[in-house]
Amino acid sequence: MKKITFPKEEKAAIVVRIQKYFADELDQTIGTLPAEFLFDFFTTEIGPHFYNQGLRDAHAALMTKMEDFGEAIYLLEREGEKR
């Protein structure tokens, strides 16, 4: 599987959010480097699980739409003349 990566600016914004979470919710200060390590840990260890769940959800949504599409085609069918 391809490694999950983020643009530098997006990663920096997420690191700031991690720091804010620690400050607001845990009353702890966390430096930039530890926050980056935590982000990298979640990206490599937890990220694939969320990614795979997203794929499963997208597949389920696609299959639902395909079923709807199949029904729409069936409704377009015409009966031939009876002799």
Image (tube, grey):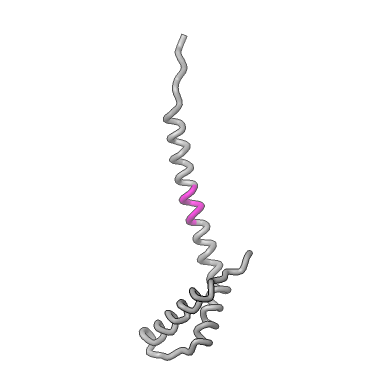
2 left or right of 35 in image:
right
Please count the marks in the image: 0
Is residue 11 placed above or below 82 in the rendered structure? Answer: below
Q: Residue visible at 37% across and 89% down?
A: 27
Nearest the eye: 50 or 6:
6
Nearest the eye: 54 or 17:
17
Q: Residue furthest top?
A: 83
Magenta stretch containing residue 60, yes or no?
yes
Q: Residue visible at 53% across and 66% down?
A: 49
Is residue 52 placed above or below 47 in the rendered structure? Answer: above
Q: Percent position (x, y) of residue 38?
A: 52, 81
Q: Percent position (x, y) of residue 67?
A: 46, 41
Q: Most prominent secondary structure in the magenta stretch?
A: helix
Q: Residue furthest front?
A: 9
- Identify the image quadrant of the N terminus: bottom right
Nearest the eye: 30 or 53:
30
Is residue 14 placed above or below 65 in the rendered structure? Answer: below
Give the quarter of the image for residue 4: bottom right
Magenta stretch containing residue 40, yes or no?
no
Nearest the eye: 49 or 69:
69
Q: Residue visible at 43% across and 40% down?
A: 68
Q: Look at the image and give the residue range highlighted in magenta.
A: 57-62
Q: Residue furthest right?
A: 1
Q: Percent position (x, y) of residue 32?
A: 49, 87
Q: Residue visible at 43% across and 91% down?
A: 29
Q: Percent position (x, y) of residue 26?
A: 39, 87
